[in-house]
Each structure stands twice: as structure tokens, then as C-alpha cells.
Amino acid sequence: MRIGIFGGSFNPIHNGHIALGTSMLSAMSLYEVWYLVSPQNPLKRTSAELIDETLRLRLVEAALDDHPHLVASDYEFHLQRPSYTWNTLNHLRKDYPQHQFVLIIGGDNLANFLRWAHHDDIIADYEIAVYPRSNSDIPEWVKSHDNIKVIDVPLVDISSTQLRQMIRSGEDVSPYMPPKVVSEVEKLSLYR
């Protein structure tokens, strides 16, 4: 089975993340998209705004509850930290040899992609599905790699950063997040 790997902080998850996963299912002929909640991104400093990984996983589980082919995963919680994509993909391949994994990343990540550990090996060994972001261009070097596919998917123009600011300001985030996530955020007083 073809499985999409969509890693991120999901701090918090929002409707754009869900729309992206749903679009990737058909665009890349995937059976499932696994949302790997990242405990720590090696290229980002740990932020005071980054809530505990188990809480972020709980929000992802709530968001994907009604989407049978979108799966919340704590897989990276059990790996060495920080979470390097190459390491994660190789562990997944070993633990799930029956699956073919497709890495899903945002176009904005391509600006730093050549700084990723083992980026050449990732390109050589895995399909990469790139979704464009409104604030980034796709670099020229991407066009020379058959394993990298830029997918035209509808994007929801909202970011987790904007949502955290809105929550702090007491603004209504319900148009941008699944109701179950909004409920959990309110119940647990997250991002206040």
C-alpha cells in the first residue's frame, strides 16, 4: 500500500492540514496519509508556543476522527531526537516493509531541504509530493528530479501561527479548525 507521510508540529492542526491530506490521497494514489506529530524539528528552535507533543497528538486524533484514511501517529515519539526525516523514513520502511512511503512536504520546506540530513538519499529512495505554499516559490533544482512531484492542491490560507495568535486574542477560530479541535483547545485552555 502507498502511504503518505505528513510530518509536522501541528501546533495546532487546522482545516488546511486536513484538506491537504484529503487532496493527497487522490492526487498521489495513496491508501492513507499518516500525520506524524513531530516532537522536535531539528531545523527549528524549540518555541515556548510549542505545546506538549501528547497534547498535539490528542488534537490531531480529534481532528482526524471522522476521516478514515487520515491517521494520527506518534511514531516519531519513539525514535531518537531530534527527528530527522531520513531516520524516520528508514525506520518506517523497516517496520512496515509492505508499504511504499511517499513524503509530503510544503513548498516552503524546499528552501531548507538541501540542509536536511541525507537529503540526497531521501530524493533517491522516496517519492516526494510537494504542495505549493502562497509565500514560497518552487526552486529550479526540483525540476531535475523525477521523484519530486509538485501537486496542485487547494490551500486554506491560514497557519498554525495565526491561529495561536487568534486564540490568544480571543478571536473565533471555528472557521479554521474542526469543531472537535476547537472544543479540546477550549477545554484544556491551550494557546492562551
Image (tube, rainbow, N blue to C red):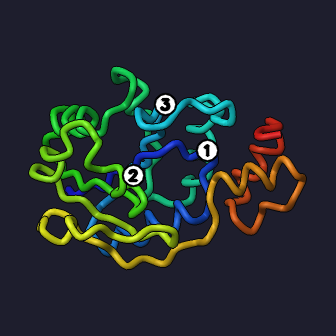
Which circle marks residue 11 in the picture? 1
Q: Mark 2 packing: few (<14 Cα in 10 Å), some, or many (20+)?
A: many
N-term-proximal mark, 1 vs 3: 1
Which residue is labeled 3 in the image?
Answer: 39
**Quick check: marks 1 and 3 in contact, CB under 8 Å?**
no
Residue occupying image coordinates x 24% and y 59%: 128
* 3 or 161: nearer the viewer: 161
Amino acid identity at mark 3 = Pro
Q: Position of residue 20 (x, y in %)?
A: 46, 66
Q: Residue furthest right?
A: 170
Q: Please, what secondary structure does the residue beneath circle 2 have? A: strand
Q: Position of residue 153 (x, y in %)?
A: 42, 76
Spatial CA distance of label 1 from label 3 is: 11 Å
Amino acid identity at mark 1 = Asn
Which residue is labeled 2 in the image?
Answer: 6
Query: Looking at the image, is 69 positioned above or below residue 154?
Result: above
Q: Please, what secondary structure does the residue beneath circle 3 have? A: loop
Spatial CA distance of label 1 from label 2 is: 14 Å
